[in-house]
Image (cartoon, rainbow, N blue to C red):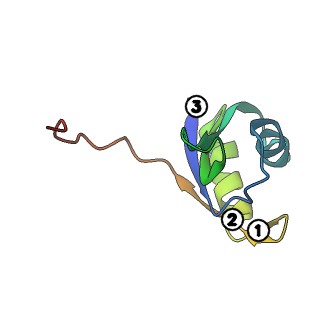
Amino acid sequence: MAKKLFVGNLPYTTTNESMGEFFAQFGEVMSSAVIMDRATGRSKGFGFVEMTNDAEADAAIAKADGAEMDGRRLTVSEARPKADFAPRA
C-alpha cells in the first residue's frame, strides 16, 4: 500500500526531481511534488512524496525527519487528508 509523506522546510531551489532523488535513498518513490506559488512560480517550501510501501515510507520518515537538504533541516511526516473547508463567499 502506498503512503504519502509531507515534507516541510524544503529549500526554495528544490525541484520535483531533486526531492524524488533525495527520498529514493529510502525506497521506491512513486511520485514527488513540490508545491509552487501560482502568483510567483516559486516554491512554497513544502511538498509531498508518495512511497510504494508503508515500510519504506516509515523508514523515510525516521531517517529524513531532521535531515539536512541544501542547508535546511527537513520536517517529514505522514501526510494527513486535506481538510474540508467551507466554500469562499
Instruction: Measure the C-alpha gap from mark 3 to mark 2.
Output: 21 Å
- Label 1 sits on residue: 67
Residue 54, placed above or below residue 52: below
Residue kind at label 3, given as amino acid type: Ala
Numbered disc 3: secondary structure: loop
- Residue 75 percent location from the top left of the image: 62, 65
Q: Is residue 43 left or right of residue 80?
A: right
Identify the residue at image location x=41%, y=47%.
80
In the rendered structure, the answer to whether residue 27 lies left or right of residue 75 reads: right
Q: Which residue is mark 3?
A: 2
Q: Are marks 1 and 2 in contact (CB under 8 Å)?
A: yes
Where does residue 74 sit, x and y in percent of width and height? 68, 65
Separation of disc 1 and disc 2 at Cα? 6 Å
Q: CA distance from mark 3 to mark 1?
A: 22 Å
Of the residues under marks 1 and 2, which one precedes in the sequence? 1
Q: Residue at x 77, y 49 (%)?
A: 14
Closer to the observer: label 3 or label 1? 1
What is the crowding at mark 1: few (fewer than 14 residues within 10 Å), some, or many (at least 20)? some
